[in-house]
Amino acid sequence: MGDVNRQWVLAERPVGRAVRESDFRLQETPIPSPNSGELLIRTLYLSVAPVMRQYMLDGAGFEKPLAIGDVMRGRGVGVVVESHHPDYAVGDIVQAKLGWQQYVISDGSPWWMMYKVHQRIAPYSTAIGVLGVTGFTSYLGLVDIGEARAGDCVVVSGAAGGVGSNVGQIARNLGCSPIIGIAGTDEKCRLLTQRLGYDAAINYRSENLDQRLGELCPDGIDVFYDNVGGNTLDTALLHLARHARIVLCGRISEYLDNEEQPYTLRNYQRLHKRMARMQAFFIYELEADFPRAEAAMAQWIAEGRLTYAEDVLEGIEQMPRALMRLYEGENRGKQLVRVDAAAETYGRGGDQARA
Ligand SMILES: NC(=O)c1ccc[n+]([C@@H]2O[C@H](COP(=O)([O-])OP(=O)(O)OC[C@H]3O[C@@H](n4cnc5c(N)ncnc54)[C@H](OP(=O)(O)O)[C@@H]3O)[C@@H](O)[C@H]2O)c1
């Protein structure tokens, strides 16, 4: 990794447009030294999520806005390489808001939302994927917000993305049927049905979504897990079963729209007709439930009932590209960047500090 700390900083705000490479600048600084009460973390993997474009604009409501020149914000998995903090030892693997950089100093205070990584059944990358906030979003969104039950017809938009790639399998493990995924290419649709637990898939770009939902969900949709919003959500409203639940997880199709002219739902009266419920959630409000979600997901992985799809780019240079891929529909499963090529070799084997 060398003796410098490479960091991506915000260079320009993507106002009214997609993110581009020139919105970021890669800078080199010395590796910082931790003081008393602090720890130095070396980044192993960084997560990429659609909300990061929002961080570049206004802070997404729950975070302080980034200034031009600030290090880009984001979660990652890292290894503690120096510690003057009583709760952390060298070799601990942690996941926290590490930012887009190779090294970071933390005081472990609540803002960092730092968790030790204890699981050993899967690669560390999963701590910011299926066994991290992304996986908890899939699980708690479907189970707690969607109240999915055995026999429910479940439809998922953005089904081949980070969140969606888990939702179909969770629905299968709960006994839901049929489970339908919506994605943007035929190749993704094959991934959904061959590997990710979906009974059928709809390519929203080449097929008539309204017609296909009618064919595949003749008794209506009990749970619509929505990652996309806009016209996809509007069309799904036409196919609700009685007492349907709509989980508003995300609305990536609207993120580039002008906020002054937001998408307006045409079919919302269907909620009334079907006595349906539509509920949004913010995953960090459900933090108390993370251990329950992690336990369920880890058990399913151990039993071979949950596979995880990760799309991993190599090297911190790839961070801007990784974020752009989300908006271009390039990623299959959870988009990650491996920042340290030796990531999986740290902290393993007899490291009692992590047990
Ligand atoms: N509520 C919460 O607390 C919470 C937490 C985490 C994430 N989220 C939200 O959940 C959603 C999924 O997050 P993720 O991290 O798993 O991202 P993701 O689904 O991996 O996002 C990328 C995918 O979105 C699809 N997409 C991009 N532009 C689109 C468009 N204009 N119309 C339709 N689909 C489009 C693409 O797939 P296709 O090729 O299929 O189009 C792309 O591969 C996002 O909306 C995110 O903001 C919410």
Image: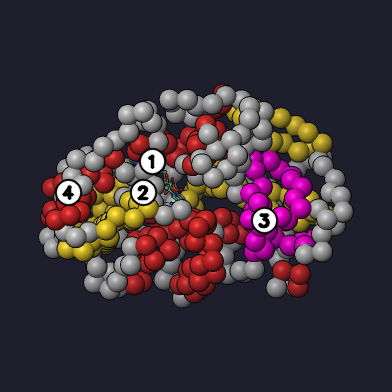
Task: Answer with left or right where residue 117 lies relative to residue 196.
Answer: right
How many residues crowd around disc 3 within 10 Å: few (fewer than 14), some, or many (20 or more)? few
Between discs 1 and 2, the one toward the N terminus: 2
Q: Nearer the viewer, residue 255 or 298?
A: 255
How many residues crowd around disc 2 within 10 Å: few (fewer than 14), some, or many (20 or more)? many
User: What secondary structure is found at the residue carrying circle 4?
Assistant: helix
Three-letter code for the amino acid on which mark 1 is drawn: Ile
User: What secondary structure is found at the residue carrying circle 2?
Assistant: loop
Q: What percent of the width, then of the height, locates residue 176?
A: 28, 69
In the rendering, which numbered label is found on residue 110?
3
Is the residue under label 2 in contact with that under label 1 (CB below 8 Å)? yes
Between discs 4 and 3, the one toward the N terminus: 3
Q: Would you name the residue on which mark 4 appears? A: 269
Q: What percent of the width, then of the height, locates residue 352?
A: 76, 73
Q: In which quarter of the image is residue 193?
A: bottom left
Q: Would you name the residue on which mark 2 appears? A: 227
User: What secondary structure is found at the residue carrying circle 3?
Assistant: helix
Is the residue under label 3 in contact with that under label 4 (CB below 8 Å)? no
Residue range in magenta is 88-117
Q: Would you name the residue on which mark 1 appears? A: 252
Q: Where's the C terminus, which quadrant? A: bottom right
Q: Nearer the viewer, mark 4 or mark 1?
A: 4
Beta carbon of the mark 1 residue lies under 8 A of ligand 1: yes
In the rendering, which numbered label is found on residue 352?
none
Beta carbon of the mark 2 residue lies under 8 A of ligand 1: yes
